[in-house]
Image (spheres, rainbow, N blue to C red):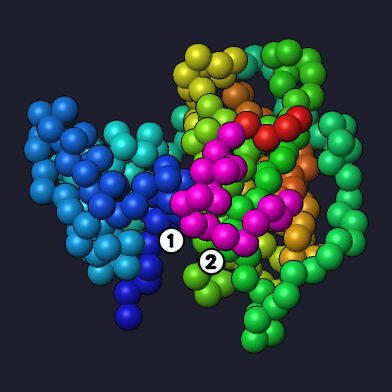
């Protein structure tokens, strides 16, 4: 059986679009770009089900326009993320927990488990800390994210209204440990001028309402940086109304 493309589905849901809406947006993007396409709901279903593992170039360009993400971040087979790193001129830094308030995980109420298996799908608050060498200070990144689980794979994508720097994570769940990769496309008008960063992440899950751990990634001069990261559970629903309610900036 084909492996569902949870990454694309998470991105579409994060955009608060139905499959019909998404297909229409892909068609409109093709028309605006001078390369019309015939995207429809059935094609979107084939992409998300994994029946079609790679879109034709005319669709790939439209998908990048609609989602604001490179095609390699949309879950299609054979896509390889590429680093895009610019110069900072400073060394790397390790940021310890609680610089900006991320504390070790504490016990919290555990949601009902169905059939003895944890399901991490839903809306989470993502919070990480990093040190900006150019500004000589520590900062916190906040996003509301939608997580979709398929087996032991967890696809995480930020809601567009929660930040002007889209965030993605692709994780594998093994017992109480989630391990994977992260990517963030910084805001074009922000301090990092649209630079794209990526790295690895590992989170421990002492309860099903909070995961805490650390990220690692390259800085602007290929220095290796680390810092704390946590995901805090908000809502198990991923319907359009719930996602719309969290499509806003998190409180600091």
Magenta residues (range): 232-248
Residue drawn at the location 22% of the way across and 53% of the way down? 55
For the residues labelled 1 and 2, the Cα–Cα distance comes to 8 Å
**Residue occupied by mark 1:** 6
| Residue that sits furthest to the front in the current view | 241
Q: Quadrant of the N terminus?
A: bottom left
Can residue 157 be seen in this snapshot? no
Q: Position of residue 111 (x, y in %)?
A: 74, 69
Q: Please state if 71 lies on the left or on the right of 86 as rendered.
A: left
Residue drawn at the location 84% of the way across and 41% of the way down? 102
Q: Position of residue 107 (x, y in %)?
A: 89, 62
Of 52 and 226, nearer the camera is 52
Q: Position of residue 144 (x, y in %)?
A: 61, 42
Q: Are marks 1 and 2 in contact (CB under 8 Å)?
A: yes
Q: Please state if 178 lies on the left or on the right of 13 as rendered.
A: right
State yes or no: residue 240 in magenta.
yes
Residue drawn at the location 38% of the way across and 34% of the way down? 68
**Residue occupied by mark 2:** 149
């Amino acid at each position: 059986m084909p492996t569902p493309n949870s990454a694309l589905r998470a991105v579409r849901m994060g955009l608060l679009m139905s499959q019909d809406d998404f297909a229409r947006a892909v068609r409109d993007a093709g028309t605006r770009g001078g390369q019309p396409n015939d995207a429809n709901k059935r094609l979107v279903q084939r992409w998300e089900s994994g029946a079609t593992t790679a879109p034709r170039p005319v669709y790939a360009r439209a998908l990048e326009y609609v989602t604001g993400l490179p095609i390699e971040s949309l879950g299609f087979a054979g896509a390889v993320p590429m680093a895009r790193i610019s110069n900072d001129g400073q060394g790397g830094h390790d940021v310890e927990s609680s610089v900006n308030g991320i504390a070790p995980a504490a016990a919290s109420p555990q949601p009902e488990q169905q059939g003895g298996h944890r399901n991490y799908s839903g809306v989470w608050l993502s919070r990480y800390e990093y040190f900006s060498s150019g500004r000589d200070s520590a900062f916190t990144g906040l996003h509301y994210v939608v997580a979709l689980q398929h087996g032991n794979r967890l696809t995480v994508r930020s809601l567009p209204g929660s930040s002007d720097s889209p965030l993605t994570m692709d994780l594998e769940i093994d017992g109480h440990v989630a391990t994977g990769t992260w990517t963030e496309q910084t805001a074009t008008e922000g301090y990092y001028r649209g630079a794209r960063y990526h790295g690895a992440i590992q989170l421990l899950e002492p309860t099903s309402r909070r995961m805490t751990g650390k990220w690692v990634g390259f800085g602007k001069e290929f220095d290796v940086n680390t810092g704390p990261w946590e995901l805090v559970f908000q809502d198990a629903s991923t319907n359009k109304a719930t996602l719309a309610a969290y499509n806003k900036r998190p409180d600091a």
